[in-house]
């Protein structure tokens, strides 16, 4: 078997498990993560949200976490904050952090046509220093919710209130005492509506 060196973009659950499985198979890998921590999108969204699947379903089969067999006795939904910690514990348990370049943004990726199956990755670190890495393969694990979708409506420029995307909200408390119109019916909208229904206007 040829030993591959793989560049991985993103340090959320997909990036972490990709790296771990590659190492188990005898390959090497490097994760590039723009944040300074493990967790991906679960670190950037509102932390009071909850997963829509229970922890036995959400967790990886090879790592239960600190709760041990208790999760099989009393399954529950983890908050995003708890799941972020679980992912960090996963990285620590399998010693993955040594392969992660934090605070490093991927600027571009291109294939080297002069050399078969070689990919170049240009990155920029927190000090704005650029560097180019060469890999045999690339795994894009940057998630499906990186680009926000914002509605546009007639009279939006005259609206006196605030229009915020959930990526800009960390705590639901900022909605306390305010009239809130939630646009959308996904998980973020459901979490926001549930919280808002429990506080006084």
Image (cartoon, grey):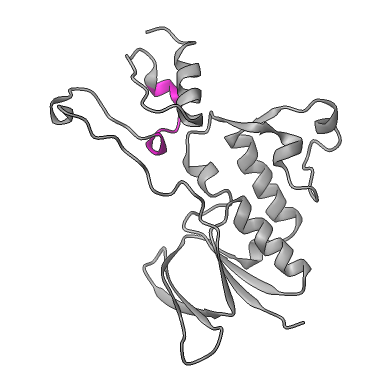
Q: Residue at x 38, y 23 (%)?
A: 174
Range covered by the magenta-colored residues: 166-174
Q: Residue at x 56, y 83 (%)?
A: 117
Q: Residue at x 71, y 68 (%)?
A: 22
User: Magenta span: helix, strand or loop, mainly?
Assistant: helix
- Indicate yes or no whether the magenta region holds residue 18: no
Q: Position of residue 152 (x, y in %)?
A: 24, 35
When the figure is inspected, residue 61 is found, relative to residue 201, above or below; the finding is below
Q: Nearer the viewer, residue 165 or 88?
A: 165
Which residue reaches farthest top? 200
- Indicate yes or no whether the magenta region holds residue 167: yes
When the figure is inspected, residue 75 is found, relative to residue 4, above or below; the finding is above
Q: Is residue 122 shown left or right of residue 164?
A: right
Q: Residue 175 appears in which quarter of the rendering?
A: top left
Which quadrant of the rendered structure holds the N terminus? bottom right
Q: Nearer the viewer, residue 4 or 201?
A: 4
Which residue reaches farthest bottom? 114
Q: Is residue 50 shown left or right of residue 198?
A: right
Q: Position of residue 17 (x, y in %)?
A: 68, 57
Q: Nearer the viewer, residue 105 or 18?
A: 18
Q: Residue at x 49, y 49 (%)?
A: 144
Give the mark count: 0
Q: Position of residue 172 (x, y in %)?
A: 45, 24
Which quadrant of the rendered structure holds the C terminus? top left
Q: Position of residue 139 (x, y in %)?
A: 57, 66
Q: Residue 85 appears in which quarter of the rendering?
A: top right
Q: Is residue 17 shown left or right of residue 145?
A: right
């Amino acid at each position: 078997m040829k030993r591959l060196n793989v560049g991985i973009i993103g340090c959320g659950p997909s990036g972490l498990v990709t790296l771990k499985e590659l190492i188990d198979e005898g390959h090497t890998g490097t994760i590039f993560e723009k944040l300074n921590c493990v967790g991906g999108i679960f670190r950037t969204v509102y932390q009071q949200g909850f997963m829509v699947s229970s922890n036995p379903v959400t967790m990886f089969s090879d790592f239960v976490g600190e709760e041990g067999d208790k999760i099989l006795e009393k399954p529950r939904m983890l908050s995003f904050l708890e799941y972020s910690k679980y992912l960090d514990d996963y990285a620590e348990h399998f010693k993955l952090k040594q392969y992660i370049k934090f605070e490093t943004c991927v600027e571009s990726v291109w294939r080297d046509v002069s050399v078969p199956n070689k990919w170049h990755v240009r990155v920029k670190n927190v000090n704005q220093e650029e560097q180019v890495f060469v890999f045999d393969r690339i795994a894009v694990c940057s998630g499906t919710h990186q680009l926000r979708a914002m509605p546009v409506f007639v009279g939006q420029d005259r609206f006196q209130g605030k229009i915020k995307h959930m990526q800009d909200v960390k705590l639901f408390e900022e909605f306390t005492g305010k009239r809130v119109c939630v646009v959308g019916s996904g998980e973020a909208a459901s979490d926001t509506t549930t919280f808002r229904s429990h506080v006084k206007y």
